[in-house]
Amino acid sequence: MHWIMLRGLTREQAHWGDFRKRLEQAFPDDRFHPVDLPGTGVHYRESSPGTIAGIREQVERQVSHIPGPYGILALSMGGMVALDWAQNAPAGQIQALVLINTSCGFSPPWHRMRPGAWPRIMRLLARRELFEREADILRLTCNTEPELATMKHWYSIQRQRRVSPRTAWQQLQAAVGYRPRAKRPLPDGLLLASQRDRIVHWRCSEALEQRWHWTMKLHPWAGHDLPLDDPEWIVAQIRQWRNP
């Protein structure tokens, strides 16, 4: 299967680090394709649509050369794009969804963005000193102390392909306004949530689990960026879900 990998707010494919390589080693029969959202990564000079549907349409065009059917592995806002895609895809095009610390309009606003996170995120998005900003983003999204090499890597990403304030604002508007349709897009999906996520409450994943009777697994200590905090746990959960 070809898997599309989507990251979250203002992040690009380089922020996955070595996670793609871990997935390829664990699932050698599959292919994994990290894709940049509009306004990030290779598209950093472009503007981002202000709706999840608009972002999803551009992502679909980007991957049209990749043969389907697809699985989608997505983190945070990327999970909203994945859900919207699955609900609008032709029958059989999307065959697997793995959503990590995502949220949607099925949950109250204070779960979708924890109240304590709002002022920190707004300050971070407005901050001009890139190295300290990226280091603080890592400290907010991870519950393990980020390594200096990771901070330097994230700083380098922003130096080369800096996300504009307009893109950040458009993506934030899209995320805040997103609410899926009621119809379940797939018989099962894998919901992975971090119990100690300081940005999105894990009950946002629980809301999807209860509504659609999907599979949910809860990590006891990781932060919002679960692929950085504990990538091997994610690999183990995907393996167990696909081969019960």
Image: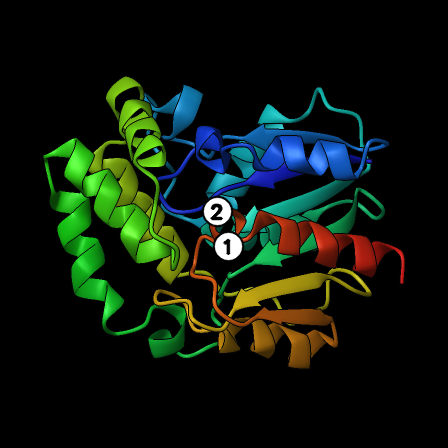
* CA distance for labels 2 and 1: 5 Å
SS class of the residue under badge 2? helix
**Which quarter of the rendering shows the C terminus?**
bottom right
User: Residue at point 55% right, 32% down?
Assistant: 18
Q: Nearer the viewer, residue 92 or 103?
A: 103
Expressed as whole percent of the image width and height from the top left, the position of residue 180 reads: 57, 64
* Mark 1 element type: helix
* Residue 76 place in picture, x, y as percent: 48, 54
The front one of 44 and 7 is 7
Residue 87 point in image, percent of width and height: 68, 55
Q: Is residue 113 left or right of residue 124?
A: right
Front-most of residues 26 and 159: 26
Residue 173 is labelled as: none
The kind of residue on which mark 1 rests is: Leu
Whether residue 106 is visible: no
Residue at the image position 67 percent from the left and 71 percent from the top = 216
Q: On the image, which quarter does residue 50 sit in?
A: top left
- Residue at 58%, 25% (x, y): give it: 62
Quadrant of the image containing the N terminus: top right
- Disc 2: which residue: 228
Residue closest to the eye, 122 or 235: 235
Q: Could you tell me which residue is drawn at 69 percent across and 49 percent down? A: 235
Horizontal side of residue 68 vs 135, given as left or right: right
Please tell me the numbered disc located at residue 226: 1
User: Which amino acid is tagged 2?
Assistant: Leu
242 to the left or right of 31: right
Q: Are marks 2 and 1 in contact (CB under 8 Å)?
A: yes
How far across and down, in percent of the image, does residue 104 sit?
Answer: 49, 66
